[in-house]
Image: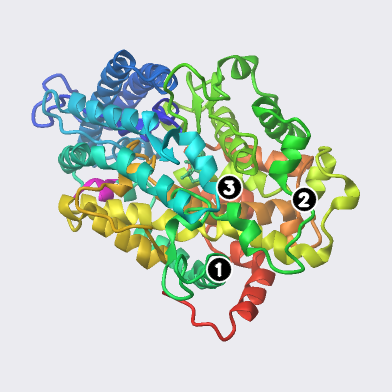
Amino acid sequence: MKPLASLAALAVALAATPAMADHHEIPDEPAPTAEAASAFVEQAETELLDKSNKAGRADWVYNNFITEDTAAITAEASAAFTATVVDNAVKAARYADVEGVDKETARKLTMMRTGIVTPAPTAPGAAEQVSALTTEMQGIYGKGQGTLEGKPISGSDIEEKMGTVRDPALLKEMWVSWHDTVGTPMKGDYAKLVELMNQGAHELGFADTGALWRSNYDMDPDEFKALTERLWQEVKPLYQELHCYTRAKLNEKYGDEVQPATGPIRADLLGNMWGQQWANIYDIVAPEGAGDLGYDLTELLVEHDYDAIRMVKAGENFFSSLGFEPLPETFWERSLFVKPRDREVVCHASAWDIDNKDDLRIKMCTKVNADDFQTVHHELGHNYYQRAYNTLSPLYLNGANDGFHEAIGDMIALSVTPEYLVQIGLLPRDEVPSADKDIGLLLKQALDKVAFLPFGLLIDRWRWGVFDGSIPPEDYTKAWVDLKHDYQGIVPPVERTLENFDPGAKYHIPANVPYTRYFLSFVLQFQFFEAACKTADWKGPLHRCSFYGNRKVGEKLDAMLAMGASKPWPDALEAFTGTREISGKSLIRYFAPLTKWLKEQNKGKTCGW
Ligand code: X8Z
Ligand code: ZN
């Protein structure tokens, strides 16, 4: 994810908190003329960039060293930033209907309002309250622990263990302890935050915070909602086939007591704390015959003595092969690559651009495994995007939309094929899986990419409901459990109660990071990937394509990235793919052979839950 700072100027970052704007009388404001509007925008951009950079720096320190003092410092900087953001958004509204405003200025005035992630009321002290709440919750999450066999275990370790442990009692212990100790204590803070953010959104002219979030996609917010629904309907049948097949395999492995053959899947059996990506249980679901791929990326990394730095170097090398400049020396000096032994840090991976120029960094508690190899590429995608648009004006220092920002590194990682692993010396050529292993390769990919889709959608469906009041605080966890049941077809391993706050056990809820971006990204990355493979003149099955080393792809990619947020996102999509529509068709084409195969496997079974 991108932190505050990089969100930067970008209204996006705008997240934080508010300040003390007074939209009724602003005595020193010039009369609203087109000239005044552009002068205002210019001054606001300078101010936003400055405050965003200051808040980003403080937030970096906090994320790397969670203490009372760093919490106070980041809360203060973030409150100052939010205050500025809200103040400028309120002023921007005054210029909205001024005649003769040029197109650029009009776009920026809109962005100043719609890019706000964490709105706060304008009343004195409210911005500070909002910042204190988000800082507090992130601290709880960052310091959070669960237990394994009764012993405390950190967030990054428990995440890894959920992928490797196969004893259902231990999986249940880890799942329950994590959700109870991390989520539950935040419930009150979260309800308070929702109330404050909604007041802030209201003052900015939005019905609630969800409406504000949905307004940031260059289209009508209702149209955006409909777009996400259309995409979900395109990919849902494939998810249902995957669910049906996976459930049967889990039933075979664990028996009816643990995983019944019908109904929803028990959440802790899927190889991931949140049941969001399932590739870690590939060994359980692998098809007979086509299942043995002959290699396991985690094992290859370990055997070849990879450590965190080598993993990141491999990611950098991919971008270099496309023609991108190497990462700056400061990236290597200032990033956090492994979990420190002696202090609390936020381990959830993130990419930063501290000065919005070239001070790029990542922060990861990297483990040497396939999951984190993927995440390294993901984070670098953010960094290369940030650098590509760093000459644009402050409000344009962002992705075409947030889904684009999330999709770049993942699109690159789709090129991590067996053939690519040969090219970088990780896999011996004679061990490349033959064509009869295609179903295995596709299934493994689907366990991450297809399994994620309903998860990516439901997080904000939950928040949209929380924000519009249809999910009141007493229903927070029930609604969460219901949505996970309905969309993903999964259930918690034990009954959840009113006191629990399961949403808080997922990073993006305490961190207040909108999540629809990932749903979009998991669709978009296949569109980008298919377009890149076409540019690279790839012939053969899409899932075997790697555009490693292709300068033509690099040039086209750079052109899209360099547009930043300066144009509506369909323009950026068109620049790279030739189409202006987000569509699930590329994903469906990528997995077409698997879909056919899954349907055969599921024949005669009652699917659904
Ligand atoms: O949060 C992330 C990235 C940082 S933007 C590591 N992701 C989502 C998650 O972990 O829930 C990437 C995939 C989805
Ligand atoms: Zn990300």
Mark 2 vs mark 1, foreground winner is 2
- The x and y percentages for residue 29 are 17, 23
Q: Which residue is mark 1?
A: 242
Residue 211 counted in the magenta span = yes
Callouts 3 and 1 close, C-beta under 8 Å: no
Q: Name the residue at the front extreme.
A: 149
Q: Residues within 10 Å of mark 1 (few under 14, many from 20)?
A: many
In front of the other: 546 or 252: 252
Q: Please say if 534 is above or below 567.
A: below
Residue, disc 2: 295
Up the image or down, 528 lies above or below 308; here it is below
* Amino acid type, callout 2: Tyr
77 to the left or right of 26: right
Q: Could you tell me if residue 217 is visible in this image?
A: no
Gap between marks 3 and 1, in whole Å?
Answer: 21 Å
Q: Nearer the viewer, mark 3 or mark 2?
A: 3
**Mark toward the start of the polypeptide (2 vs 1):** 1
Closer to the camera in the image, 20 or 348: 348
Q: Position of residue 7 (x, y in %)?
A: 42, 31
Q: CA distance from mark 2 to mark 1?
A: 23 Å
Query: Is residue 408 rendered to the left or right of residue 420?
Result: left
Res 164 label: 3
* SS at mark 1 in the image: helix
Start-end of magenta stretch: 207-212
The quarter in which the C terminus is drawn is bottom left
Within 10 angstroms of label 2, few (less than 14), some, or many (20 or more) residues?
Answer: some
Q: Amino acid at mark 1?
A: Leu
The residue drawn where x is 75% and y is 47% is 547
Q: Nearer the viewer, mark 3 or mark 1?
A: 3
Q: Is residue 274 magenta?
A: no
